Image (cartoon, grey):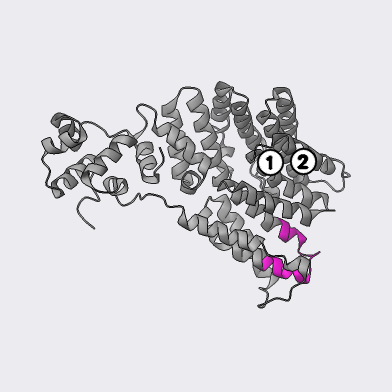
Amino acid sequence: MDGSELLPVGRRVAYWRGRRKLSQQVFADRLGRSKSWVDKIERGVRSLDKVSTLRDIAAVLRIDTAVLLGRDVRPATPTARIEGVERIRAALSTYEIALGRPATRPAVPAGRVVRDVGHAWVQFQHARYPQVVDVLPGLLAGVQRISADDHESNRPLLVDVYRLTAALLVKLGEVDLGWLAADRAMATGAGDPLLVAAATVQLGQVFRASGRARAAVSASLAAAYRIALLGPDDGGPGELSLCGTLLVQAGLGAARRGDDRATADLLDEAAGMAAQIGDGHDHHRTAFGPTAVDLARTAAALDLGDAGEAVAWHERATRRDAWRWLPLEYRAAHLIDAARAYLQADAPASAGRALADADRMAPAEVRHRPAAREVLAQVARTPHAPATIVTLAAALGVT
């Protein structure tokens, strides 16, 4: 550790300027600034609030921007994520179940596989995406291996791991590969309305992420109404949660298409189901409840072009105690939507606070999700962006 690591940014500039044996005047000349400006930066009187300025200073000092900001923040490299995604692709490219290939190694005990899949879902819901990327190829192989021996009994587990795979890949911007995982889940669940409904939740996400809003609405409604046709003895909170979640997916698809009437009707219908369940549940990995529906209204209003309404729904929903009961991944993803809404409502400072909250809550949501990095870049470019956001944008190399 060198002495610069614990210093404020301005003092760190002075430290590295001294290491490079540059006077303030020479340093200022190379930056095209005044000596007074450099002096104020180094004393902390003036803040460094632009990514471009930070990069200019780092270039003159011949150091990486992350070193200028401190070693606790480093430029993100996609290498590990890309390698992980390729391993997931390879795991999805095997067809042991269909081809009936003999196992090349002993199957992991089914009970352990069930526990491992459950643990991976917990990791995902805590937005620990790099960890999920690491374990998912092995989970896919393990579940496929035990399903080859007893496919019918292990169908729910296979759907569960395909759903997790699709959800993760959509987060990482790998929509086409996510579509393959969602399609596998649908095919595996065929014939069982509940398994199909669970798989359709991720299929709807894939369709919306790939710009196929009409398909998202159609598939989500078809799966939801199949559940609605189940008799009263077959229903329960889990089934109601799936049906309501699918209505939310259809509502978001309708919003993406600009159909405000259908959006309102579908989300109102979902809200009625959510009221019967209440908050604080996570049936079928949906986290469905009244607060989840109101968060969906934020995203829908944003897609319909009403940023003011989106902000109002966001602020109303996040004041509830139930907001804190939702999974970290769910909350952080919503905060990205809230940041977009604040930007469109010409409130960049509030957008910055929403992003900063998301990063504190679930760093991987901001740092590994392409959609979030795009919003981060937009906020960092606004005048008087929060210093924390400028620092994060520079560390991640987004502009």
* Main SS, magenta residues: helix
At label 1, the amino acid type is Phe
Residue that mark 2 sits on:
219
At label 2, the amino acid type is Ala
Q: Position of residue 187 (x, y in %)?
A: 78, 54
Query: Quick one: SS at disc 2?
Result: helix
Q: Which of 395 and 94 lies nearest the eye of the viewer?
A: 94
Residue 148 picture quarter: bottom right
Residue 321, can we see it? yes
Residues shaded magenta? 142-159
- Is 221 on the left or on the right of 313, as rendered? right
Discs 2, 1 touching: Cβ within 8 Å: yes
Q: Which of 330 and 85 lies nearest the eye of the viewer?
A: 85
Q: Position of residue 9 (x, y in %)?
A: 25, 41
In the picture shown, does residue 60 fall above or below 352?
Answer: below
Q: Please tell me how many numbered marks the rendered image carries.
A: 2
Residue that mark 1 sits on:
207
